[in-house]
Amino acid sequence: DILFTLSLDGDAIAQDIERKTIDGRGSFDLVLKHVPGMLRVNPYTKVNTVVTPRTADRIAKSVAYIHGLGFRWFDVTPDFGGGWDRGSLAVLRDSFEELARYYLLCHRRGEKLNVNLFDDKIRAFALGASAEHCDACDAGKSQFSIAPSGRIYPCVQFVRDDDPADENHAEGPGHVAL
C-alpha cells in the first residue's frame, strides 16, 4: 500500500505566505484545484501542515478549513529552524490551545479528525509507552519525501531550500540520487 501526504500549510493566507511558486506567486490555488481528485483516489490522504512564526496564528483556522475540504488526517509540524522568539512561541502556544478546542469539538460531534500532536500522545499514554515510542521520522526505512524539484529525500527534515534550478544541490544532507 502507498499512502500519500499533501504538504498544505493551511488556508489560502497561510499557504501563500510560505509556499510560493517559482515565479513568486502563492501556490494555494494550484494545490486546491487537485484536492477533489486526490480525495477521490485516496480518501486517506494525510495533510502535512508546517507552522512557521508567520503562520502560527492561523493553525486552528487552517486545520478547520482543510478539514472542511474532506481531509481527516493531519501532521501539524512546527518549522524547527523557523527563527521562533518568545512572542511567536506565545502565539504558537495559544494557537495549539485553539486547535485543541477544535479537535475536541469535532470528536464530540463524532467527526473524524486525526491530529498527530494529540493522537500520538493519546496513543502513547493509552499504551503506557514513553515518548520514544511515538511516530517519528525513520530516515527512509518506511517513508520518503519528494521535494517540489522532484528530488527524493529520506525524511522531510532534509528537504530544505530545494531549488529546482540548482544543479549542484545533490550534495545536501539526505539527498538520494537515482
Image (cartoon, rainbow, N blue to C red):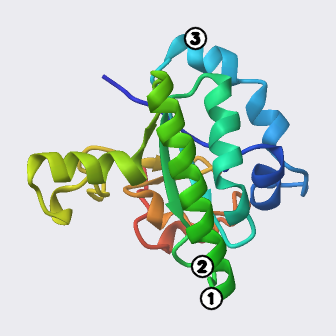
Residue situated in front as seen by the camera: 38 or 158: 38
Please state if 103 lies on the left or on the right of 92 as rendered.
left
**Residue 62's mark?**
none
Residue under the image location 32 percent in, 57 percent down: 137
Callout 2: helix, strand or loop? Answer: helix
> Which is more foreground, mark 2 or mark 3?
2
Type of the residue with mark 2: Leu
Vertical arrangement, residue 18 with respect to residue 122, above or below:
below
| Residue 125 % position (x, y) | 18, 53
Label 2 packing within 10 angstroms: few (<14), some (14-19), many (20+): some
Type of the residue with mark 3: Arg
Farthest top residue in view: 40
| Residue 168 % position (x, y) | 60, 71
Label 1 sits on residue: 86
Callout 3: helix, strand or loop? Answer: helix
**Residue 89's mark?**
2
Instruction: Report whether residue 8 is seen.
Output: no
Cα–Cα gap, marks 2 and 3? 37 Å
| Residue 176 % position (x, y) | 41, 57
Q: Are marks 1 and 3 in contact (CB under 8 Å)?
A: no
Label 3 sits on residue: 40
Q: Are marks 2 and 1 in contact (CB under 8 Å)?
A: yes
Q: Of the two numbered discs 1 and 3 on the same chain, state the one appearing first in sequence.
A: 3
Callout 1: helix, strand or loop? Answer: helix
Vertical arrangement, residue 77 with respect to residue 52, above or below:
above
> Which is more foreground, mark 1 or mark 3?
1
Cα–Cα gap, marks 2 and 1? 5 Å
Residue situated in front as seen by the camera: 164 or 51: 51
